[in-house]
Image (tube, coloured by chain):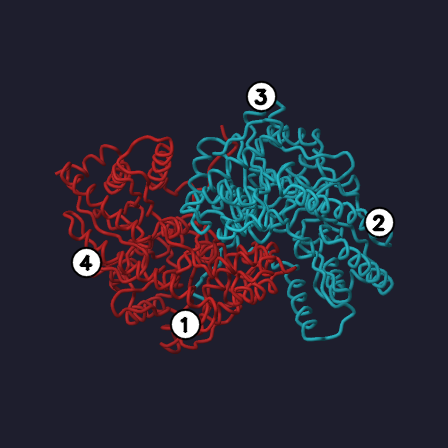
Chain colours: A red, B cyan
Amino acid sequence: MSVLQEICPNVRNMKNLEGAILARQACQIKEELRQGVRKPYREVIDVSFSDPHRTGVKPLTFVRQVLAACIYPQLMNSNKLPVDVRQRAQRLLRACYGGSIGSYSEAAGIPDIIHRISGFITKRDGGLPSYPENIHTTAGSQWSLMNVLKVLVNSRASPRTAVLTPGPCYSTAILSFMSVGAVVVPYYLSEKQGWKLQIEELHRALDSTKGVYNPVALYIINPGNPAGLVQSRKSIEDVIKFVSEKRLFLLADEVYQDYVYGGNKEFVSYKRVLAEMGPPLSDTVELASFHSASKGFLGECGLRAGYVELVNLDRAVMKHTNTLILKQACAPVLGQIALDLMMNPPQPGDPSYPLYSMETQYMQTTLAHNVKKALLVINSLPGFCCQPVEGGQFLFPRLFLPHKAVQKAKEAGIQPDTFYCIRLLEEAGVLASPGCEYNQKEGTHHIRFCIMTHMDIMEELLKRLTTFHTQFMQDFS
Amino acid sequence: MSVLQEICPNVRNMKNLEGAILARQACQIKEELRQGVRKPYREVIDVSFSDPHRTGVKPLTFVRQVLAACIYPQLMNSNKLPVDVRQRAQRLLRACYGGSIGSYSEAAGIPDIIHRISGFITKRDGGLPSYPENIHTTAGSQWSLMNVLKVLVNSRASPRTAVLTPGPCYSTAILSFMSVGAVVVPYYLSEKQGWKLQIEELHRALDSTKGVYNPVALYIINPGNPAGLVQSRKSIEDVIKFVSEKRLFLLADEVYQDYVYGGNKEFVSYKRVLAEMGPPLSDTVELASFHSASKGFLGECGLRAGYVELVNLDRAVMKHTNTLILKQACAPVLGQIALDLMMNPPQPGDPSYPLYSMETQYMQTTLAHNVKKALLVINSLPGFCCQPVEGGQFLFPRLFLPHKAVQKAKEAGIQPDTFYCIRLLEEAGVLASPGCEYNQKEGTHHIRFCIMTHMDIMEELLKRLTTFHTQFMQDFS
């Protein structure tokens, strides 16, 4: 018996994710394939994450060259690396203590890099000032979110602290809220309208907390994950007015800002819209905006680096946030360097520019091709329906499952879309995630999969999905 | 005014560290030096952390070569890197999804690396089995500790959860306990007896919680930080009996296990002693042991990687811990690779062995020299007294400050040892940490500084310290 009388309820309440069943099964199948067990496929295609290198997307050469030179500076003695790579590595190493990426940096990040992130934000937002002291790097945007939550959420409070959270919303965020003791109150995006965010729905969600919880923040993901919406300026303005009126802290997850490909859509940051709305809003609405080195064209998920920019924070809150940051060890230094390279890529005229430009253009072409092809295929299948996507790295098509399949899932004690994903994995070797993990609207079923893969892998995936899905619908019809 | 009605008390209660005053001042001084302002020194020597590369210790060539090859695999096409470096990099890349360190790994870490960590532990503990499923890697041992604490500490509970914590104890650990809502109850090590851990003192500390708090865990640092004690097998046995009797969870911070240099002392792990004590203890005492890539001879603090091994955990607790780990993104992949290299260094006969061996021996020589020299100098100064150190990377000498200095500090509203450290920084350009940050016994004063520096830097540091201290004692006598 354990020495523990009781497990912390924040942890106890975290559901044992159905995705975990899938992940374990995927491991087992991979092991069987390695041992030569014959299956209808030779490899599992894992599109359950946004993790481009996993599915054949190549790292950017410039990024890897600078990182390698920073790690092993002897490389700079040869002429094999382009001169701008060497110069960049030298500059970055000068900013590291003792000239080594093995030293800790300041808790918030290397000051030189923080300044360059701030410069990137200013440029992105049309000259709007960004203050380095409001920017903190962490080991991924999830940790940035956790830092802000630790200040926002009082886990001992009664009534309990609530965060308005989109439905659908990616599962890591939901678990982060729960792990700090917050209650997740969903507002549902309108699937029929391409996952549009409706202000009436925000009001409904907020009203539902009355007398039960203490709502402190609104969490927004733009561009969306898993739903690929990109908010218009008007929609952002409406959200800002709402949080201002209701005195909510605005948590803006903007990690997919580089991934906007819907017709005439473009990414506009919450910070920019807020500033352009002018006083009193621009001076009062408290905002945290998150970005990450995993989610831009770098796709360097394994390096673990993200940042948060804080806007309009009350001085007392800012002081506590800084204390919290200060007590933590720094973000991985190579991850910080990746952020620097992401924010400041090679420019026309630089020796590395032509290759860099070719590689990123190829990614854009790949993504455009994958989205188009995947939408076409999925929407041609019976029982499948996917809204047009404007941004992000995922499709989140709706599944209309036959009654027999829903029944079968019930008997197995799992959600119907988990049942579908398990079969998809077993029979077709495709690992996608079930919609039940994403705060989807009750009674609906979806699957999520990443579209930032090598073109050939997407072709293969769609082929397997088509065969599997057709058979599945037949089997359970 | 903020939208926040109240800041989470766990965060609010975290003291604004006095070290922060020092860090800010150090930044300012460095900026002044850069601008050419004349001071009695040309550079600040920062020994406030254990951060060897910062103070001139060189990274290990083998480690940096493998990391560079993993980041930029094109390097493996040339013969410039030794063959064992290339083989190791190839093996590690094969274990990464898509062959890239830019992919996420499993949440607990790359299975191949976890197996090799487990192999290292088995070998270290004389063949005692270690199970990969009990090992999790994180972005540094601090995060591993936080994960365990999140399960152990119920922040909503009343009476509040307490952790018995050594005095002195390094400040990051103290802040970690506080940030999850635990109460830190100090047990004091006996400075006069070379910082020995006394079981009577554990009893006293535990008794002090009666009727006030709910003690759930005992936190131990062995080898010590900041006190450089290395526990004997007998002392470890006594602690194990104590926690078993009192039904406490044992948190064993063993990150300095490579740094033992006191005469005939050697590091023995808690896990090994526990196993060798036999049933029922060996089957029941719940233990978490922490280690890190920052604190071995690698000194790769900037990579951010550590691991925890869990022993005898109740199944329900283990399930919750796994859920918690699962919801997090993985540890930085390059940090995981550093752990692999640390646990499995080049062996005699490998091409990289001679250089690796020379480099690590040089570090040991440096450390032995630095410890000896620093103890000699400090113990020759009036008002300074340092116990012999047996392990770890710090000296924590006691300061007997003149009454006038204590008075002056009081007037300035700071602790006497912070006052000393500020003067040391301003006048001698040496950044050490004040004992008040380390749960030192009330009424005593200390400073902490890292001794794992380049020899020349240690010489320079001791010269500056001697001049400064002599003058300080005169000024305030």
Can residue A73 be spotted in the picture? yes
Q: Whole-Å distance between the Cαs marked 2 and 3? A: 46 Å
User: Looking at the image, which is closer to me, B90 or B31?
Assistant: B90
Tag nearer the camera, 3 or 1:
1
**Residues at marks 4 and 3 touching, judged by CB atoms closer than 8 Å:** no
Three-letter amino acid code of the residue under disc 4: Lys
Disc 4 and disc 2 in contact, CB within 8 angstroms = no
Relative height, residue A349 to residue B236 (above, below): below
Q: CA distance from mark 1 to mark 4?
A: 32 Å
Left or right side of B364 for A116: left
Looking at the image, do the residues carrying marks 1 and 4 touch, with CB atoms under 8 Å apart? no
Element type where label 2 sits in the image? helix
Tags 2 and 1 both on a single chain: no
SS at mark 1?
A: helix
Q: Is residue B472 left or right of residue A324?
A: right
The residue labelled by disc 3 is B279
Q: Residue B444: x, y in percent?
A: 76, 51
Label 2 amino acid?
Leu
What residue sits right under mark 2 in the picture?
A: B376
Please give the label number shown on residue A192. Answer: 4
Front one among A351 and B162 = A351
Q: Residues within 10 Å of mark 3 (few under 14, many from 20)?
A: few
Numbered tag placed on residue A124 in the rendering: 1
Answer above or below: position of B291 versus A284.
above
Residue B364 spot, x, y in % from top left = 73, 44
Give the structural element (helix, strand or loop) at label 4.
helix
Identify the subunit bearing mark 1.
A
Q: Are marks 2 and 1 in contact (CB under 8 Å)?
A: no
Amino acid on which disc 1 is placed: Arg
Tell me which chain the residue with mark 3 is part of. Answer: B
* Element on which disc 3 rests: loop
Label 3 – label 1 distance at C-alpha: 64 Å
